[in-house]
Image (cartoon, rainbow, N blue to C red):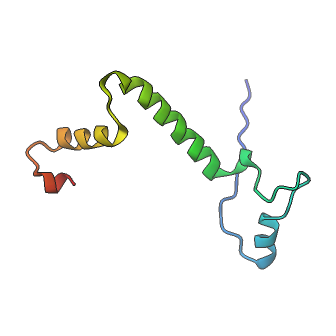
Amino acid sequence: MTMTHTTVDISPPTTDKEYIEAFETDTNGSCLPPLATAIGYKLRRAQLAVFQDFQKSFASVKLRPTEFAVLSLIAANPGQKQTEVA
């Protein structure tokens, strides 16, 4: 099995021409970069998948991600005052 990885250059454009090319309209009339190569899009999709899994896993106890984070902080730092956790 051969795996291929697409390399995406996320460095900022350095010339005015590169800025313009980054937002040129493609053949479909869209001025957005292809979503398949947009790192922000991929990160958002991954975050949505994680949150959906979290919600399924903790639905029975009605625990939200923020509450989980606070409980994790309390568990890792017993004896802390509320102001120190915040």
Q: Is residue 9 visible from the viewing direction of this image?
A: yes
Residue at 78% in and 64% down = 23
Q: Is residue 85 left or right of residue 51?
A: left
The outermost residue toward the left is: 79
| Viewport quadrant of the C terminus | bottom left
Number of numbered discs visible in the structure rendering: 0
The spot of residue 51 in percent (x, y) is: 47, 36
Q: In which quarter of the image is residue 71?
A: top left
Please tell me whether residue 70 is drawn above or below residue 33 in the rendered image: above
Q: Which residue occupies 57% across, 46% down?
A: 43
Outermost residue on the bottom side: it is: 16
> Would residue 46 be found to the left or right of residue 27 on screen?
left
Q: State whether residue 24 is above or below residue 17.
A: above
Res 7 visible: no
Residue 3 image offset from top left, x and y in percent: 71, 32
**Nearest the eye: 54 or 17:** 54
Q: Position of residue 6 (x, y in %)?
A: 73, 44
In the rendered view, does 54 fall on the left or right side of 77? right
Q: Tell me what residue is drawn at x 42 percent, y 31 percent.
A: 54
4 relative to 42 in the view: left or right: right
The vertical placement of 20 against 86, above or below, is: below
Toward the viewer: 16 or 28? Answer: 28
**Residue displayed at 72% across by 47% down:** 35
